[in-house]
Image (cartoon, coloured by chain):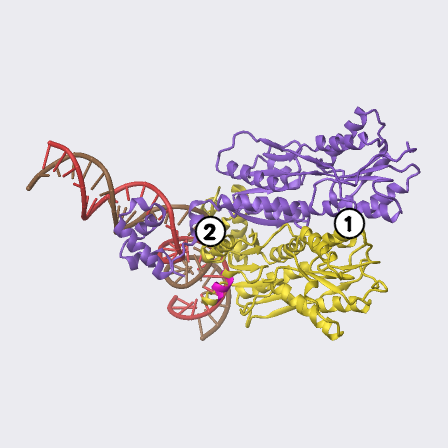
Chain colours: A purple, B yellow, C brown, D red
DNA sequence: TTTATAAATGACATCGGTTACATCAAGGTA
DNA sequence: TACCTTGATGTAACCGATGTCATTTATAAA
């Protein structure tokens, strides 16, 4: 691999001139510039960007902590990040943490060891982040999708409470009174906010909240299936199920069908995220559309602004949601409470 | 940020000793080692790995070229890569190329500019790769999932021909004679191999190949829907549809249902990949399971072996497939040819 | 022509580690 | 005691670029 010295020697100039000819061409005379460029081509010179990064102390790498890349929603978010990062000359170091704390730590360390300039995390409330921030560490970090509690950190999020409230209202308007919610893990702020929105809508409509209709899941297809089956086994089963993501909704749909019930005739199902599969379920799924790619690009933009010192106070960017009404929700069956 | 010199000064030793105390502890006396470690802790020293990488000329970064991270199958592959890379102390630089050649080029350049040690690509036949290899370039590259034509490059792949053949045989055994194939883009080697397997099975069973039953798609849900609709409009429609991936199969299922037909009563549908959603379609999808995560981990292992000079001739690793029989395929309807 | 000024270029230190080589002290052997 | 070996540590070159500062060359003004 040829280096800048080879070029300098061949062109008969100093290394400084080569560097300038490539970085600030206007500081170099046309004649010399031509000589240099010819030499560059001749020896096939490619600058060693590792050296540049080392010298400059800027890596232009961003660490992305993703609980599971195999999650359709996150995949879209990553896609958005990737695009924005590329446009700004940054690269993404992808870390599939599988919610493993040790893994998260190990990747976060990449920022401390100067392998990356900053970090984006898609999972909130992970202990390392709390420690980091409390220690007053200067780790440039942005939080996306889930919001971190009690921590001042630039964040891009959805108004989950409002979105859950909107969906619940939609079901209430269809005449449903017994609306179940298949929620995520209790410790997730996402869950907390969405449950809050759900309860707000219920109480605004004077519908009593029933603890037994709040069924925990873990965002997988399987857990949606399981939760729906359990809900149907209740003495007084719900007429609608609002799932905290589309995967669980798809699982729920299967469970409901296996119980011999009709959607939405007997029971309505709603999801959250609007993944591509949502339009292809039978019946197509009513859900909340999130601008996933925009989550990613916004997070990257915020992080780069933060890294490059263009960000003042930690902003919270709230992205819009959209209730997509498809065929999985319909009027509550008559004769049922 | 403290550096190795700060540590040396505080510990009252030379920088070389600090370096040794951390890298080859057995070369340093216990007493000095303790002093050094204390100093390290005291100043909060974190080695600048960018400097190390620069000095060593090894980045321990791998570029991964993915056509679309938002594809469920690729997401699993990436997950497997990530795991294997992490285990071996490597990081993944993720590149969502969107099949854009310029993007691919720009990312491949990262290897030339010493930002990464090697490259994995999941899309075959991209022109840059061809150029690279033809130019006799020494870019360490591994090909996964799709096999590169006419290019000697370590590869990990499925025996797509055999898999397609197996699925077609399954449909033939169920009595189907008019079996359509919803295929991918014609230029894809994947498509070529799977179509070949399909044709082999047909001719082995003395079933004439009908060009009109070969319908092109692009691996998206929408294209599956479109293709199925078109196939059903044929004068003599098929009784089975074999789709080249599960997304297209899911799209096809919707199209078939919208035409008022029953699956598998009127028509059977088969997919390929066994993505998580395949078990949750209605009816659950018969498909070919691919060890996606293993694709990723094998590709990474091969690439690291190649980089570290442990690989002789370019191997081709063939991973096993598994025909998962679910409820979307059944006996051909009686009375139909 | 001389001088002041601007433009172009070169020499060299620098970033933060690693490592080959030199040095030195301690212990063992003849 | 002299000599050699071994182990522990220090000195300094080095990786490949950038950027400061000094120096040379070209240009314009007097």
Q: For residue B130: magenta? A: yes
Instruction: Work out whether B226 lies above or below B308.
Output: above
- The residue to which callout 2 is attached is B51
Q: Is residue A99 visible?
A: no
Please state the horizontal and vertical placement of residue C4, each as a whole percent of the image: 16, 34
Count of numbered circles on the image: 2
- Disc 2 packing (10 Å; few <14; some 14–19; many ≥20): some
Q: Residue at x 84, y 62 (%)?
A: B333
Instruction: Work out whether A279 lies above or below B102.
Output: above
Please state the horizontal and vertical placement of residue A65, each as a whole percent of the image: 62, 45
Q: Quadrant of residue B200?
A: bottom right
Instruction: Work out whether A273 lies above or below A8.
Output: above
Q: Is residue A146 visible?
A: yes
Determine whether the residue tagged by mark 2 lies in a helix, strand or loop. helix
Q: Of the numbered discs in the image, which one, if any, rests on residue B258?
A: 1
Judge depth for marks 1 and 2 and give the one in front: 1
């Amino acid at each position: 691999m040829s280096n800048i010295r080879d070029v300098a020697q061949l062109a008969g100039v100093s290394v400084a001139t080569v560097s300038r000819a490539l970085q600030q061409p206007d500081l170099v005379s046309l004649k010399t510039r031509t000589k240099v460029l010819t030499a560059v081509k001749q020896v096939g010179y490619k600058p060693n960007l590792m050296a540049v990064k080392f010298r400059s102390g800027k890596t232009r790498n961003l660490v992305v902590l993703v609980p599971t890349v195999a999650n359709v929603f996150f995949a879209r978010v990553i896609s958005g990040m990737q695009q924005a990062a590329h446009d700004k000359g940054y690269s993404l170091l992808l870390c599939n943490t599988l919610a493993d704390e040790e893994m998260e730590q190990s990747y976060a360390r990449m920022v401390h060891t100067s392998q990356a300039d900053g970090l984006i995390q898609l999972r909130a409330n992970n202990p390392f982040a709390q420690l980091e921030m409390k220690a007053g560490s200067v780790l440039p970090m942005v939080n996306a999708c889930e919001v971190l509690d009690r921590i001042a950190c630039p964040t891009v999020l959805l108004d989950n409470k409002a979105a859950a409230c909107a969906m619940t209202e939609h079901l209430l308007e269809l005449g449903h009174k017994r609306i179940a919610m298949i929620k995520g893990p209790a410790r997730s702020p996402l869950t907390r906010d969405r449950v809050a929105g759900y309860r707000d809508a219920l109480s605004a409509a004077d519908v009593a909240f029933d603890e037994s209709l709040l069924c925990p899941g873990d965002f997988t297809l399987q857990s949606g299936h399981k939760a729906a089956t359990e809900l149907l086994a209740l003495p007084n089963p719900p007429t609608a199920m609002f799932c905290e993501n589309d995967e669980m909704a798809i699982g729920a749909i299967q469970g409901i069908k296996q119980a011999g019930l009709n959607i939405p005739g007997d029971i309505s199902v709603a999801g959250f995220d609007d993944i591509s599969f949502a339009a292809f379920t039978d019946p197509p799924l009513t859900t909340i559309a999130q601008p996933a790619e925009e989550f990613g690009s916004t997070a990257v933009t915020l992080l780069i602004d933060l890294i490059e010192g263009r960000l003042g106070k930690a902003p919270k960017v709230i992205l819009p949601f959209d209730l997509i009404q498809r065929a999985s929700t319909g009027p509550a069956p008559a004769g049922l409470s």
